[in-house]
Image (cartoon, helix red, strand yellow):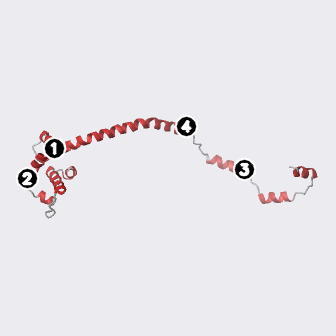
Amino acid sequence: MFEQYDQSADYRSAFINAVYHMYQKTNNNKSIDLTVDDFDKTSDETLLLILENILEQDSKVKTEYERVKSKLPYERFYNANKIILVEATKNVSDSFIKMSNMFETLNKPLLTSINSAMSSIIVPTIDFHRMTIAIDNIPKFDFPQLQLAISSLPKINYPEIASVLANI
């Protein structure tokens, strides 16, 4: 009903939609299958009789219906149901608000701690220009030439060193 009203902004159409859904839930006679259009084509007198029947069966809706200040019966029915829905969901909404506040209270110290830890982390800045200069200043070795130079050194026989190394 509420969705129908939001789409059409027509209380009569919203009422018809609600009645049609009631009909679908309670229709045990499958040989007669009415549509929303069938209800839409119904006279206002018949729809008002249906409305009176609903109010007689549901005292809560009837009580709210009588409190609503409007001359239009479909608008009164819509607003009565809206009031009942708000009252029915109020406790749930209040519970969600309480849970949200509790989570916020629990999360504040945690967020403060995380923020403090994050602000104390020092991330080094990289100066690529200075790093490139330092790399360029590293001496360059020609390893094949160094290997050739080492292998061309004269072989020196130091028996003292050999005997010390053998005892290690």
- Residue at figure coordinates x 46%, y 35% from the top left: 109
Q: Are the two marked residues, 2 and 3, in contact with CB atoms closer than 8 angstroms?
A: no
Give the CA separation, mark 3 to mark 1.
Answer: 89 Å
Which amino acid is tagged 2? Asp
> What secondary structure is marked by label 1?
helix
Q: Nearer the viewer, mark 4 or mark 2?
A: 2
Cα–Cα gap, marks 2 and 3: 97 Å
Please name the residue that numbered disc 1 is placed on: 61
Q: Which residue position holds label 4?
A: 120
Q: Nearer the viewer, mark 3 or mark 1?
A: 1
User: Residue 88 or 45: which is nearer the viewer?
Assistant: 88
Give the vertical position of 33 relative to 15 (above or below): below
Residue 138 numbered mark, or none:
3
Residue 95: image x %, image y %? Answer: 32, 39
Of all residues shown, which one is farthest toward the front?
A: 28
Estimate the x, y position of residue 20 in percent, counting from the top left. Answer: 16, 55
The reply, left or right, for residue 134 in relation to residue 41 is: right
Amino acid beneath label 4: Ser
* Numbered label attached to residue 44: 2
Q: Nearer the viewer, residue 47 or 167?
A: 167
Q: Residues within 10 Å of mark 4 (few under 14, many from 20)?
A: few
Q: Position of residue 80 (x, y in %)?
A: 16, 43
**Distance Cα–Cα, label 1 vs label 2:** 20 Å
* Comparing labels 3 and 4, the label whose residue is closer to the camera: 4
Mark 4 and mark 2 lie on one chain; the one further toward the N terminus is 2
Q: Secondary structure at mark 2?
A: helix
- Residue displayed at 51% across by 36% down: 116
Badge nearest the viewer, 1 or 2: 1
Q: In the image, which disc is placed on residue 13? A: none
Structural crowding at the residue carrying mark 3, measured as other residues with C-alpha within 10 Å and reported as few (<14), some (14–19) or many (≥20): few
